[in-house]
Amino acid sequence: MKNKTDKRIRLKSKIRAKISGTKERPRLSVFRSNKFIYAQVIDDAKGKTLAQASDLPRPGKASVKMKKGTKTEHAKEVGIAIAKACLGAKINKVVFDRNGFKYTGRIKLVADNARAGGLQF
């Protein structure tokens, strides 16, 4: 193992071997960088992204409109936004993919707020 990223990628491949998204239950994948957090709902059978949300400020794209705040506050907003996007696309149930990250901190906040927003997983 060379560094943390290599370890996360190794764990990610083990997780992805066990879960995949279908049309009825797509995969909610969460990625955390040092600055931003991203969430997307993926149908692995078709290879299509059905919904997405992030706190990355992108003009003209769907992103959470955040002003100032901590990264944990941004993660809460991304969780709520992905739930709204899924419910708008008539998706109620998803499979959660933590993408090799530990289920704590910002990853947990996205999951908890997506559940509070109406998603089941």
Image (cartoon, rainbow, N blue to C red):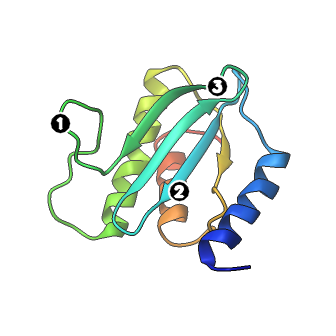
The answer for how far apart the CA atoms under marks 3 and 2 are is 26 Å
Q: Is residue 56 left or right of residue 41?
A: left
The answer for how far apart the CA atoms under marks 3 and 1 are is 25 Å
Q: Is residue 70 above or below residue 32?
A: below
Q: Position of residue 57 (x, y in %)?
A: 22, 47
Judging by the rendered image, the residue that carries numbered circle 3 is 47
Q: Is residue 113 left or right of residue 11?
A: left
Q: Do callouts 3 and 1 mark residues in contact (Cβ within 8 Å)?
A: no
Q: Residue at x 43, y 23 (%)?
A: 88
> Is any atom of residue 112 visible in this view?
yes
The quadrant in which the C terminus is found is top right
Q: Of callouts 3 and 1, which one flags the residue occurring earlier in the amino acid sequence?
A: 3
Q: Is residue 56 left or right of residue 66?
A: right
Q: Position of residue 82 (x, y in %)?
A: 44, 40
Q: Residue at x 53, y 28 (%)?
A: 49
Image quarter for residue 4? bottom right
Judging by the rendered image, the residue that carries numbered circle 1 is 59
Residue found farthest to the left: 67
Q: Is residue 56 above or below residue 28?
A: below
Q: Residue at x 27, y 71 (%)?
A: 70
Kindly identify the amino acid type of the residue bearing the numbered disc 3: Gly
Kindly identify the amino acid type of the residue bearing the numbered disc 2: Asp
Judging by the rendered image, the residue that carries numbered circle 2 is 112
